[in-house]
C-alpha cells in the first residue's frame, strides 16, 4: 500500500493508537439498474468512449498506487457480465465481483462483509462516476491518516432553495456553506462498521450515502471534506451519457509524453508503422520522427508512390510491402486528405467524388485492409479529423462532413475491434501549417498556426499509448516558435497531406 503520509498520524486523539491500516480497499458500487436512462440494462454496462462505464471506473483504481484491492458490488443478475469485463481488461487488483443488496445501505453491508475483519481503509465509489481522478483518490487516502471519515464535494454554482409540499420556497441557505456531494467516500473500517452497527437498532434507519450514516449515528466523528471536480459526474440521465463521452474526449487531449529520447527509442524501436499520406505535412514529419526513434516506417502517397488510399488494391499492396519487409505491422496512420473550398451547389461532380473518395472512402478502405495485420500485433489505427467536425461550415460542407464521419468511424471501430485488442483513435489538430493548408488559404501569420512537428509528436504519443476510441485535441503550446512550411513547386491537387481545420 502506497500512501503519502502528509499528516502525522500521531495527531489522533490522546489515548488512541495511531492509525495503521493493513491495506486500502476500493469498493465499486455497481448496483444501479439504469431505469432513469431507459436502457433495459444496468447503466454501468453502457459503453462510453469505447468501453463500458464500469471498466473506465475500475481502471482508475487499478492505476492508483494507493489502492491495494478492489471489490465490485454488481446489480443482481449481472455479476457474470461484470466478471467478464474484469477478466478481459486484466484488472489484477479486483479480488471479488459479487451481488450487491437491494438498497445502497444493504450493499454497503454486503461490502463490509466482503472486506472482512481487520483494520483497513475503505473507499466506496459509484461505478457510474467514470471520470474520477487519481488526485481525488490520493487525497481521500491521505486524509484517512488524520480523519476516520472523508467525503468528496464541490461548491454549488447554483443557488439552492428549500421548498415545502406545495413547491413554495421556505428557505434559501447561504450558498457559500453548501457543497454538492460526490464519491468516493472514504472511511477507516472500524468507523463505518460501528456506524452501521448502531444503525441496525434504529427502525427508522434510512440514508442515501455512507457519510450520512456516520453523521447520524456517530455525530462526534468529524467528516473531512476534500475537493472533488466538475468532471466527476454521475451518469444518471440520458444527457449525462453525452456529457461523459465529451469529457472523455477532452480528458484525452493531454496524452502522456515520455521523458527523453531514450524512453521513446525503447518504446518505438522495432515497430513497423505504415503512413498513408507520408509525403508532406504531418505524415512526413511523423515518418521522420518515428524513424529517429528506431521504428521502421513505410510512407505511401499518391504523389510519391502512386498509392491511392481509396483503391483497395493500392492499399493492400502497400500493407503487403511493409509486412513482407518486417514481418509485422504495429500501426497504420492515415493523414491523406484533400480540402476543396466552395459552395456545394457550385461544385462539379468530379470534385465531389474526389473529396468523398479520398477523405472518407480512403480511411474506410485502409481500415478494412489493415485489420488482419493489426490483429496480429494488437496494434492501432490512427486517423485525423478537423475542428470543423463539431459543426459544419459554409464553403466546407463536404470537408466538414467527412471529418465528422471519421470521428464516428473511430468510435465505432474502437468498439468493434476491442475484442481483437486493436485500438483506434483520431487526432484533432488546431489549424496547422501544412502544404495543404497553404494551398487552400495562402500565406497566414505564422504565429497563429500549429507546427506540423507538434502534431507529429502528439501522434506518436497516441500510438504508444493505451487510448482507444478517443478524439485527441492538439493545440499550439504557448510560446511555440512559428514554423515555416515549404510548399513543393509542383503539388498534385489531391496530394496526401494532413487534413486540418
Image (cartoon, rainbow, N blue to C red):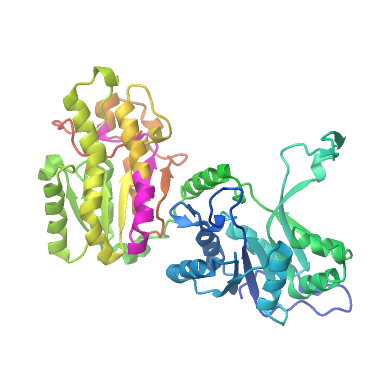
Query: Which residue is nearer to you in this view: 324 or 105?
Result: 105
Residue at the limit of the structure toward the top, as seen here: 346
Q: Of residues 481 and 451, which is closer to you in this image?
A: 451
Q: Is residue 389 visible?
A: yes
Placement of 163 over or under 56, stated as above or below: above
Q: Quadrant of the N terminus?
A: bottom right
Q: Is residue 279 rendered to the left or right of residue 244?
A: left
* Residue numbers of the magenta segment: 409-436
Residue at x 34%, y 52% (from the top left corner): 413
Question: Residue 168 lies in what quarter of the image?
Answer: top right
From what the image shows, is residue 287 above or below residue 362? below
Q: Position of residue 70 (x, y in %)?
A: 59, 71
Report which quarter residue 356 is drawn in.
Answer: top left
> Percent position (x, y) of residue 363?
25, 45
Q: Quadrant of the C terminus?
A: top left
> Is 20 placed above or below 254 here?
below
**Which residue is at 16% across, 43% downward?**
301
Picture coordinates of residue 295 (x, y %)? Answer: 25, 60
In the rendered image, the vertical position of residue 161 relative to residue 149, given as above or below: above
Q: Can you see residue 462?
A: no
| Residue located 36% across and 63% down the image | 419
Q: Nearer the viewer, residue 4 or 72?
A: 72
Is residue 388 found inside the magenta-colored segment of the image? no
- 341, 89: nearer the viewer: 89
Q: Is residue 424 magenta?
A: yes
Q: How many marks?
A: 0
| 417 on left or right of 351 | right
Residue 157 position, x and y percent, is 71, 39
| Residue lying furthest bottom | 118
Amino acid at each position: 500500500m502506497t500512501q503519502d503520509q502528509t499528516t502525522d498520524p500521531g495527531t489522533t486523539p490522546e489515548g488512541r493508537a495511531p492509525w495503521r491500516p493493513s491495506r486500502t480497499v476500493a469498493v465499486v458500487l455497481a448496483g444501479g439498474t439504469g431505469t432513469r436512462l431507459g436502457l433495459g440494462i444496468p447503466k454501468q454496462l453502457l459503453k462510453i468512449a469505447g468501453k463500458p462505464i464500469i471498466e473506465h471506473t475500475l481502471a482508475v483504481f487499478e492505476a492508483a498506487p494507493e489502492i491495494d484491492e478492489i471489490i465490485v458490488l454488481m446489480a443482481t443478475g449481472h455479476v457474470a457480465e461484470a466478471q467478464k469485463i474484469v477478466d478481459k481488461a486484466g484488472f489484477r487488483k479486483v479480488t471479488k465481483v459479487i451481488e450487491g443488496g437491494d438498497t445502497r445501505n444493504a450493499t454497503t453491508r454486503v461490502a463490509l462483509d466482503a472486506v472482512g475483519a481487520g483494520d483497513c481503509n475503505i473507499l466506496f465509489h459509484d461505478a457510474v462516476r467514470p471520470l474520477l481522478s487519481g488526485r481525488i483518490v490520493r487525497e481521500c487516502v491521505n486524509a484517512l491518516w488524520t480523519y476516520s471519515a472523508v467525503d468528496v464535494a464541490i461548491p454549488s454554482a447554483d443557488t439552492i432553495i428549500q421548498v415545502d409540499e406545495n413547491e413554495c420556497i421556505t428557505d434559501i441557505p447561504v450558498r457559500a456553506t453548501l457543497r454538492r456531494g460526490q464519491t468516493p467516500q472514504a472511511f477507516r473500517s472500524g468507523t463505518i462498521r460501528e456506524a452501521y452497527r448502531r444503525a441496525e437498532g434504529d427502525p427508522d434507519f434510512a440514508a442515501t450515502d455512507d457519510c450520512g450514516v456516520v453523521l447520524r449515528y456517530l455525530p462526534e466523528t468529524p467528516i473531512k471534506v476534500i475537493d472533488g471536480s466538475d468532471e466527476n459526474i454521475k451518469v444518471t440521465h440520458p444527457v449525462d451519457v453525452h456529457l461523459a463521452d465529451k469529457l472523455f474526449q477532452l480528458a484525452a487531449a493531454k496524452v502522456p509524453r515520455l521523458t527523453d529520447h531514450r524512453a521513446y527509442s525503447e518504446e518505438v524501436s522495432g515497430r513497423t508503422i505504415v503512413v498513408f499520406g507520408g509525403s508532406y505535412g504531418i505524415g512526413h514529419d511523423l515518418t521522420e520522427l518515428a524513424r529517429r526513434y528506431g521504428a521502421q516506417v513505410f510512407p505511401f502517397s499518391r504523389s510519391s508512390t502512386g498509392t491511392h488510399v481509396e483503391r483497395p488494391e493500392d492499399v493492400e499492396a502497400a500493407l503487403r510491402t511493409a509486412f513482407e519487409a518486417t514481418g509485422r505491422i504495429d500501426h497504420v496512420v492515415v493523414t491523406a486528405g484533400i480540402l476543396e473550398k466552395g459552395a456545394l451547389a457550385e461544385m462539379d461532380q468530379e470534385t465531389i467524388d474526389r473529396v468523398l473518395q479520398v477523405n472518407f472512402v480512403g480511411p474506410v478502405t485502409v481500415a478494412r485492409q489493415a485489420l488482419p495485420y493489426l490483429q496480429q500485433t494488437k496494434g492501432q489505427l490512427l486517423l485525423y479529423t478537423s475542428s470543423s467536425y463539431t459543426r459544419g461550415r459554409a464553403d466546407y460542407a463536404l470537408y466538414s462532413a467527412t471529418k465528422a464521419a471519421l470521428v464516428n468511424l473511430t468510435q465505432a471501430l474502437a468498439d468493434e475491434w476491442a475484442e481483437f485488442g486493436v485500438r483506434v483513435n483520431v487526432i484533432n489538430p488546431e489549424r496547422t501549417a501544412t502544404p495543404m493548408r497553404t494551398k487552400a488559404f495562402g500565406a497566414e501569420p505564422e504565429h497563429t498556426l500549429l507546427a506540423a512537428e507538434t502534431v507529429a509528436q502528439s501522434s506518436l504519443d497516441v500510438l504508444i499509448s493505451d487510448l482507444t476510441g478517443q478524439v485527441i485535441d492538439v493545440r499550439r503550446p504557448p510560446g511555440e516558435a512559428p514554423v515555416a512550411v515549404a510548399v513543393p513547386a509542383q503539388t498534385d491537387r489531391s496530394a496526401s497531406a494532413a487534413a486540418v481545420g
